[in-house]
Amino acid sequence: MTQPDPKQPDPYATESFTGDPYAQNPYAASQPQYGGYGQPQQFTPAPPSANGGWAVAAIIFFWPLAFVAVSRAFSVYPLWAQGRYAEAEAASASVKRLGVISLFIIAALIILYILVVIIAVAVGVSSDSSV
């Protein structure tokens, strides 16, 4: 059996370690974190939904709003790809809002139509009974 060389310190001795293993680097927050190819990592949010279904609802139920809804739906991804995340979110919300507005407009028109038919029938029935 060989004896350890007295000139070299024992690698397993605990006395040779003089630092806190859990010490934090005070400069870590100011240093950029580099990903692949030396580029700083940046947080990229997920692309928002284009809300194409709401654009189709606008086409079906109230087509004048469909022009704006479809153009905004098609602009969501290009805005996101350019890094204009807030504008992409706003365009997505706009498509949804226009789709909901088109549903409310068609619902109001249907209710108005039903009221007009009921009033016309009531007027027609009352005029037939007087004759």
Image (spheres, helix red, strand yellow):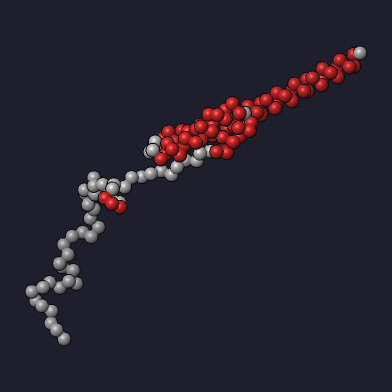
Residue 66 location, x and y as percent? Answer: 57, 30
Residue 88 location, x and y as percent? Answer: 44, 36
Relative to 81, is 17 above or below?
A: below
Residue 86 location, x and y as percent? Answer: 41, 35
Task: Quadrant for residue 6, please give it.
Answer: bottom left
Q: Residue at x 57, y 39 (%)?
A: 53
Residue at the extreme left of the image, as rendered: 7
Quadrant the N terminus occupies: bottom left
Residue at the extreme right of the image, as rendered: 131
Relative to 121, is 10 above or below?
A: below
Quadrant the C terminus occupies: top right
Q: Is residue 31 visible?
A: yes
Task: Quadrant for residue 30, please give it.
Answer: top left
Q: Is residue 95 left or right of residue 62?
A: left
Relative to 28, is 82 above or below?
A: above
Front residue (pair 27, 13): 27
Q: Is residue 41 left or right of residue 47?
A: left
Q: Is residue 100 visible?
A: no
Q: Residue at x 72, y 24 (%)?
A: 113
Q: Residue at x 78, y 20 (%)?
A: 119
Residue at the extreme top of the image, as rendered: 131
Q: Is residue 128 left or right of residue 77?
A: right
Q: Is residue 123 left or right of residue 23?
A: right
Q: Residue at x 29, y 47 (%)?
A: 40
Front residue (pair 71, 123): 71
Residue 92 location, x and y as percent? Answer: 49, 35
Give the total number of marks visible in the rendering: 0
